[in-house]
Image (spheres, coloured by chain):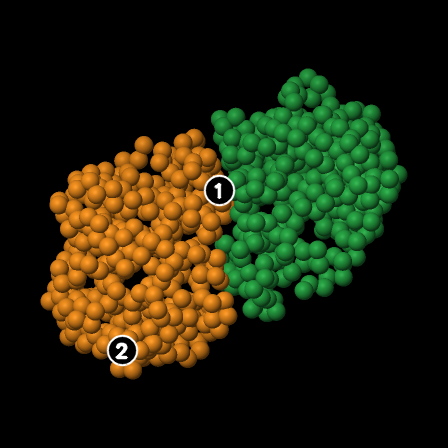
Chain colours: A green, B orange
């Protein structure tokens, strides 16, 4: 169930509350990515300390390892990874198109070979929902085809037609065999063609789902094209359902999308960037490998998480330069805290009816990038 | 200050309490190894949760990175790594002999090249104490030469004479420039020759230090030779001072040494073995990569630490096989908990006057290695 609690008069930003089987999610929300049943380097206890409300699992990866028999034995991913708050799983489609070998798309589904051992596998709209039923995620995503960028209009049209046919089959499967309580989101595709994005949104809304994702973003297209694609889709999505922009993005991009009416986000950036030794701050990205932090006794920022506050930039630099795991652990916690905190500030600004000013102030300072 | 609280009637095991500038250490004690200013993968908060009472730092590594100017700026290692309980530092001598390049021992000290960048460096008995003064450790170790094994008697004699001359110089430096409150331990060498071990102990005791270490153990010699070396030294060390066996060892070896009157231990095994995916249990080492744990829903052991208890062997196996950091983190916490817990059980058994039986029961079961 999704409640719309407030709308911002200065933008299209929304403040909402999504109630899922494993808990309540306040939106706008950022979802840390836990590809293989773990948010890289972070324990579930730490995720709770960070006030993470929902995390993401990757169906493709979990399907390969640990595999469905084990997740079935454990009664799902929640118990397997000892995380009892909500989980969203992608359908696995994106990874089939980006990681798997020798893939072959047919109307029936997609044949591919595992990138791990080369074994022959097959995903269909129905099978990925069945898989996500075993995983037991709170939100399951439909199988789609995510066209690459750049992409000819003709390809985008054909691809969209396939995604739509798969959505129709998914809808039937859900009606017949859907898991009680599990939410199902289809994915709006259409590449950079606004009329295709609109058509995709309308056609999916006709099928009536629990929420709607916008996919095929941040796949290499110019930033302005990404916003245009979202702007083309959002007006045709129902106000009473949550909207999720998949795989985006930088902090300032998240705020841009919030102000366009998007409620949910996931992105590997905060965790991936941390493993390279960089920390997000209100003043931009801080590269802790930089010599300027060699003697810096201050924590990453004044508003870092209490778990990170005891550690100086100089100490973190020392750890990172020596490949000590504690270094990337602390920066990962900081970056997740930053992304989760950014969404908390966004929620607060929307409730204050002042989101556009918050976004502009944040973006100006963030892009200026003057780190003290 | 060291208080001898109890002695075990069934062995030479002792129960003691060592009061140091940063806190009290109950002995026998295991000290987790924090080579480069971090116990690998573990945060200081977690070390506190594990009830670690004292950790070890490596002077050679800290001298190279982050280097003394930075540690001086921070007022020592405690503030730099955000750990406010006791720290013991080795002298750096052992690493000079095992890691550094082109080393040349002279009566004055040891010339060597950094294993990182080849720069020319020099450690003397006085310089390593000065360095440990900057590090601000609670216990500083004297510079010694640790002969390799096997080793001719003639070499062992010459080496021991050098270690003794260095100890005399160290004693003078401490009297003149020692840091108030810092404890200083010399190292008993003498290879596998009992009379040299005895002589080393007697000569060092004549110089009067705060405690005494036994070095050159577990360098490749047969286990029985290690025990013989300890047995040759211990009777000549004062009962009123703590005794520290450096770099040892397996859990059952620790108990053997406790029953020979040793109070303090450090070893990389629990952390290193964890990074290879193996967990210590009362029934021996559990290799979590093993296929037999694929579907095992139980935690590593019934008495694992609460931080590890939520995770099944099957989940840990999944994490470890996929090189996920959370896997080695949890097993590291478990192994440190096991070593720290073993010493806690040893303290309890000594107070109960029943240590020999505890040791024998533990060892029988541990060596049987029948993991359920």
Q: Position of residue B196 (x, y in %)?
A: 14, 68
Q: Which mark is residue B178?
A: none
Tell me if I can see residue B164 in this picture.
yes
Disc 1 from disc 2: Cα separation: 53 Å
Residue that badge 1 annotates = B319
The residue at 47%/49% (across/down) is: B45
In which quarter of the view is residue B203 placed? bottom left
- The numbered mark 1 sits on a residue in which chain? B
Dot 1 surroundings within 10 Å: few (below 14), some, or many (20 or more)? many
Q: Secondary structure at mark 1?
A: helix
Residue that badge 2 annotates = B172
The residue at 30%/74% (across/down) is: B174
Q: Is residue A23 left or right of residue B145?
A: right
Q: Position of residue A367 (x, y in %)?
A: 76, 58
Q: Nearer the viewer, residue B334 or A185?
A: B334
Q: Using the image, determine if residue A148 lies above or below residue B96.
A: above
Q: Nearer the viewer, residue A285 or B210?
A: B210
The residue at 59%/43% (across/down) is: A50
Q: Position of residue A238 (x, y in %)?
A: 82, 29
In which quarter of the view is residue A145 placed? top right
Q: Nearer the viewer, mark 1 or mark 2?
A: 2
- The numbered mark 2 sits on a residue in which chain? B
Tell me if I can see residue A107 in this picture.
no
Total tally of numbered discs in the picture: 2
Label 1 or label 2, whichever comes before in sequence order: 2
């Amino acid at each position: 169930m999704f409640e719309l609690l407030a709308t911002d008069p200065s933008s299209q930003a929304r403040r909402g509350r999504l109630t899922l089987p494993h808990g309540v999610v306040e939106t706008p929300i950022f979802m840390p990515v836990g590809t293989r049943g773990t948010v890289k380097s972070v324990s579930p206890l730490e995720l709770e300390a960070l006030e993470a409300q929902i995390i993401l699992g990757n169906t493709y990866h979990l399907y390969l390892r640990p595999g469905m028999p084990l997740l079935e034995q454990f009664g799902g991913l929640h118990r397997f990874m000892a995380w009892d708050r909500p989980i969203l799983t992608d359908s696995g489609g994106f990874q089939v198109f980006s990681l798997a070998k020798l893939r072959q798309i047919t109307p029936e589904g997609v044949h591919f070979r595992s990138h791990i051992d080369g074994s022959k596998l097959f995903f269909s709209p129905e099978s990925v929902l069945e898989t996500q039923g075993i995983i037991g995620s709170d939100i399951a995503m439909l199988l789609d085809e995510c066209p690459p960028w750049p992409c000819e209009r003709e390809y985008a049209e054909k691809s969209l037609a396939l995604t739509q046919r798969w959505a129709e089959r998914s809808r039937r499967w859900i009606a017949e065999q859907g898991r009680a309580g599990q939410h199902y989101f289809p994915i709006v595709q259409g590449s950079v063609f606004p009329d295709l994005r609109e058509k995709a949104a309308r056609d999916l809304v006709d099928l009536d789902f629990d929420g709607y994702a916008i996919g095929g973003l941040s796949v290499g297209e110019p930033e302005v094209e990404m916003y245009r694609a979202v702007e083309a889709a959002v007006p045709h999505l129902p106000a009473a359902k949550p909207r999720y922009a998949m795989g985006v993005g930088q902090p300032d991009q998240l705020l841009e999308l919030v102000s366009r009416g998007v409620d949910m986000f996931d992105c590997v950036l905060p965790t991936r960037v941390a493993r390279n030794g960089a920390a997000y701050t209100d003043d931009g990205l801080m590269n802790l490998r930089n010599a300027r932090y060699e003697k810096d006794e201050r924590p990453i920022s004044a508003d870092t998480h209490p778990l990170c506050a005891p550690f100086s930039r100089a100490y973190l630099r020392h750890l990172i330069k020596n490949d000590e795991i504690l270094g990337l652990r602390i920066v990962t916690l900081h970056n997740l805290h930053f992304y989760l905190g950014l969404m908390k500030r966004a929620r607060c600004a929307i409730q204050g009816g002042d989101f556009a000013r918050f976004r502009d102030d944040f973006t100006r300072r963030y892009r200026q990038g003057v780190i003290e």
